[in-house]
Image: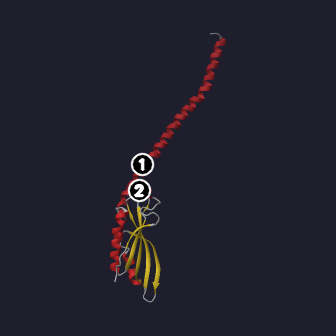
Amino acid sequence: MNQREKLMVGACGLVVLVVGLPTLVTATVGMRGGKDALKQADAKALAAKRQVRSLEAEIATLKPQVGAVTWSETPDLLYPDVATQIFRLGKKAGVSIPSIRHVDPRPLDVLSEQPLVINVSATFPAFVKFLYMMQDPALKLSMDRVRITSTDTESDAVRVELSVSTYTTFMLPSTSKGRPSGSAGGSSTGSASATTGA
């Protein structure tokens, strides 16, 4: 190999080194970066698993509390039982309950809500007693609204519309969301009526 060929080989080697070195450096950095990214992903996955375990533990703790304020029956089976209990309370309190109307149940994130509208006729003291009895935890009711529809100052009589809700862990089908479950155009799906009181 003459001097000229040696120079050409050396030049080619220098070109390869100059061109290849950045690629090698980039590949090495890329491998390191990939390892760092994997480590970060593993750390995030581990943190997510810890959070899931923490949430599961919290849910397990809350289950008894949720069970104490909710039912497990379907809304159709729940309504008659709750209505019967309300009528019994009305009789004990000495009020008249002309009707209890149940509105279409509403699906929530993890529960189903069954709204009820209760019409009450009574003297004001008897109504206050009934309202107090409605706070019984066994009923598992939440008081949404109290609307006095009429009053009689001479007899101290009032007519009141109570809007309450009870909740069940039974989940409604997704097809029920946003549409009536039992009626074509109305908002109520049924009612019960009775006269309880003196």
Residue at the (42%, 83%) spot, across then down = 124
Which label belongs to residue 96? none
Say whether residue 57 is left or right of residue 31: left
Taking depth in this image into account, of 139 and 197 the one nearest to the observer is 197
Numbered badge on residue 49: 1
| N-terminal label among 2 and 1 | 1
The image's mark for residue 173 is: 2
Q: Eyeballing the image, is 156 above or below 99?
A: below
What amino acid is at disc 1?
Lys
Q: Amino acid at mark 2?
A: Pro
**In the displayed structure, does residue 90 sit left or right of residue 187?**
left
Residue lying farthest to the top in this orientation = 2
Q: Residues within 10 Å of mark 1 (few under 14, many from 20)?
A: few
Q: Image quadrant for the C terminus?
A: bottom left
User: Within the image, what quadrant is residue 193 found in?
Assistant: bottom left
How far apart are labels 2 and 1 at the CA level?
30 Å
Looking at the rendered structure, the secondary structure element under dot 2 is loop
Q: Give the quadrant of residue 194.
A: bottom left
Residue displayed at 42% across by 48% down: 49
